[in-house]
Amino acid sequence: MYNESMTAPRASARGLRSELDAEFEQLLDSSFWNRDALSFWLRVRGEQQEQLFAAARAAREKVFGRRVVVRGLIEVTNLCRVNCEFCPMRRDNTKQNTIFQLKEEQILETATHIRDAGVNIVFLQAGEVPRTTQLVGNALPKVRKMFSGPVEFLLCLGNKTEEEYTFLKRPVVFLNNEIFIGSEKKTVAALKNAL
Ligand code: SF4
């Protein structure tokens, strides 16, 4: 049970880095965060809230250091069949929302802007609808081809079946202007021939 007599961490973010006191270490311990503790710390305000933010910043700096990672985000669609209460794209809002869904050429055009901006992390995000599997899965090899160097893809498309995940992560090889997609026997044989 959470003890409400516990005080917030007292030190500043800088101070916390140098002197991780017992209270701060307790905040970093996942077993500390039971329902009562979460409820208490979500409701703190004023100085105590500032102290909590300082602890969060200190924890972030400890793990990630002072660096910024820039990702290029492509919002594929705001349609969703799920109804998460916190989310403006939830199913119940569909009638009020202006619905959009990108076509493949719009995904490719947006990816071009991301590449031209010097960003090599492409994050494709959508509500959970089955149609994004084919749309995004077909666009991924083409987006990959746009980048001459390494590129990282992040997908946030909701829950998919195992079969859909297999499709989304299928291997892609570029060789002399040719593209080989997937690991079917005929594709592997064609790749071997081209080597
Ligand atoms: S599944 Fe994702 S997009 Fe859909 S309602 Fe939940 S959080 Fe929003």
Image (spheres, rainbow, N blue to C red):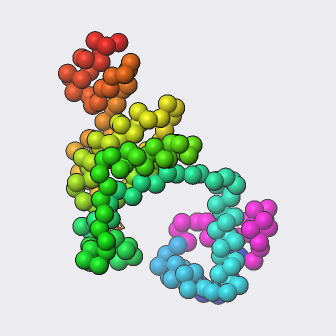
Q: In screen coordinates, is 8 left or right of 145?
A: right
Residue 76: image quadrant is: bottom left
Work out which residue is located at the far left of the displayed protein and give it: 186
Residue range in magenta is 10-32
Point 27% across, 48% down: residue: 135
Figure quadrant, ligand 1:
bottom left
* 48 vs 101, nearest the viewer: 101
The percent coordinates of residue 26 (x first, y second) are 63, 70
The kind of secondary structure the magenta stretch mainly shows is helix
The percent coordinates of residue 83 (x first, y second) are 29, 73
Point 54% across, 66% down: residue: 30
Q: In screen coordinates, is 52 left or right of 172?
A: right
Point 77% across, 72% down: residue: 12
The percent coordinates of residue 51 (x first, y second) are 70, 77
* 39 vs 190, nearest the viewer: 190
* 40 vs 157, nearest the viewer: 157
Look at the image and say whether residue 90 sits in the magenta stretch: no
Residue 142: image quadrant is: top left
Quarter placement of the C terminus:
top left
Point 30% across, 47% down: residue: 104
* 6 vs 111, nearest the viewer: 111
Look at the image and say whether residue 20 sits in the magenta stretch: yes
